[in-house]
Amino acid sequence: MSQELNSQISSLLLSVGSNHALNLESNLQELPMYTFEVEIGCIVQEFAKFLDQYPLLPGVILLEHGRYIGMISRRRLLEFLIRPYGQEIFFKESLRVIYSYARVEILLLPETTPILTAMQHSLQRSPELLAEPIVVQTADNTYKLLAIEALNFAAWQIQTIANQIRYESSQAKMIQNDKMANLGRLVDGVVHEILDPVSFIWGNLTYVTSYTQDLLKLINAYDQNLTHSSTEINTLKSEIEFDFLEQDLSSTLNSIRSGAERLKKLVTSLQNFCHIDEVHPKPVDLHACLDSTILLINTRIKGEIEIIKNYGNLPPVYCFMSQLNQVFINILSQTVNVLLNTSLSSNQYNSHSLNPQQKSRIEITTQVVSQPATNSHASDSRWVSIRITDNGPGISPELQKRILESFSSEKMADKETSLGMSYRIITSKHGGKFHFRSQLNIGTDIEILLPLV
């Protein structure tokens, strides 16, 4: 029996290694483990000698005729030996006797189990089992022992890495938020500088139009009351094409008015988009936010996408306007990208297009809806629904699954997606709901629900 144990100890020494560089995805096979196995018929006295010789050995894997049947830890074995007359009773017995008394629930995990998951399973055990080693299955009928101290230390290392990543991420977000706030203030100042001359133009156009009409009336009065027309005046009228000038001047003033109005709306929309939110939410006109966003993306659409607005009667909604504008621009920009790419592909490969005659379309519908209350004694809650639907190619089920997982996953992504950011703004910042649905060759439907408070 001693010779058998010696061979087991030699394999034990070879199985103990050093930790690899751990990361958030590390699993149990990257940790040092013990491959010490003995037959259950081994005498306790002989086995106790090896426990003295190897103080780090957490226990032993028990075999019967070469097949795994269980594990007994160093701690559990010593509990029996330090009892009164424990050594006299158990020293000459086999491990089978102690195992029959000490049999407890054993935590058995595959080697591919993530370290943090294994730590969670370990902490779910009853208090008297928290110090017990874990049995790790590495192959068919191949088992190793993992000391709980090694698992705790590895989990602590990974938590430290996670905390560092979280700290760096929060610092990066703080810097980005500060940068965006400074950019918002800069844009707001530039917008004010643009709005001042636009206001001058817009305000004076009324007077210019009135003055022009009065001057034309005066010229017509002169023409009608002069008995003899001057050759010099007729020549000058011919040179400046007075008849055309008289007809076109009104159209020119209307064009200037239209351009000034459009510039004013565009600059106002930019000012609303870069609005710096206050500490508390304020009542906001959602239709004005949507119109501002649509005006900003109209420069990319260029008539290739039809935008249909089905606006309902909405009350002002308490929210953070800048963050809500960010959500709208994220969703509409991504939708426009997909539709423009689809339109380009349809033009290049018209024979493969599902319906080349169908124009790309985005439909925006707003309304007040009721949601059933979770409590049977409470009344239904009222929400504002903003639904953005397109007739694009849709999203594949695999990509939809990844998008939905990113909404609920607590993993820290290297790069946050626009939909993920929008989901967090709606659900975390506004207490709303974010529904995402898509079907291939039919389109994508995104619904935002904001509570009416």
Image (cartoon, grey):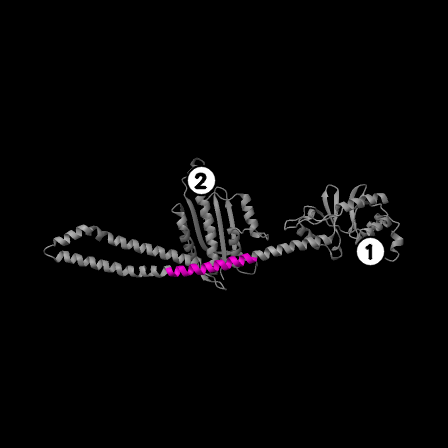
- Between 126 and 39, the residue placed more toward the observer is 39
Residue ranking furthest to the top: 351
Asked if the stretch drawn in magenta spans residue 178, the answer is yes
| Percent x, y of residue 353 | 44, 38
| Percent x, y of residue 130 | 74, 55
Q: Which mark is residue 345?
A: 2
> In percent of the image, x 29 and y 61: which residue is there?
204
- Between 126 and 270, the residue placed more toward the observer is 270
| Side of 231 relative to 277 (left or right) | left
Magenta segment main secondary structure: helix
> In percent of the image, x 43 and y 38: which residue is there?
348
Q: Quadrant of the N terminus?
A: top right
Q: Alpha-carbon distance for marks 1 and 2?
A: 74 Å
| Percent x, y of residue 275 | 45, 60
Q: Which quarter of the picture shows residue 225?
A: bottom left
Which residues are the magenta region?
170-193
Q: Are marks 1 and 2 in contact (CB under 8 Å)?
A: no
> In percent of the image, x 39 and y 57: which residue is there?
267
Among numbered discs 1 and 2, the one appearing first in the sequence: 1
- Between 313 and 225, the residue placed more toward the observer is 225
Q: Secondary structure at mark 1?
A: helix
The amino acid type of the residue labelled 2 equals: Ser
Q: Which residue is mark 1?
A: 79
| Percent x, y of residue 361 | 42, 46
Asked if the stretch drawn in magenta spans residue 104, the answer is no
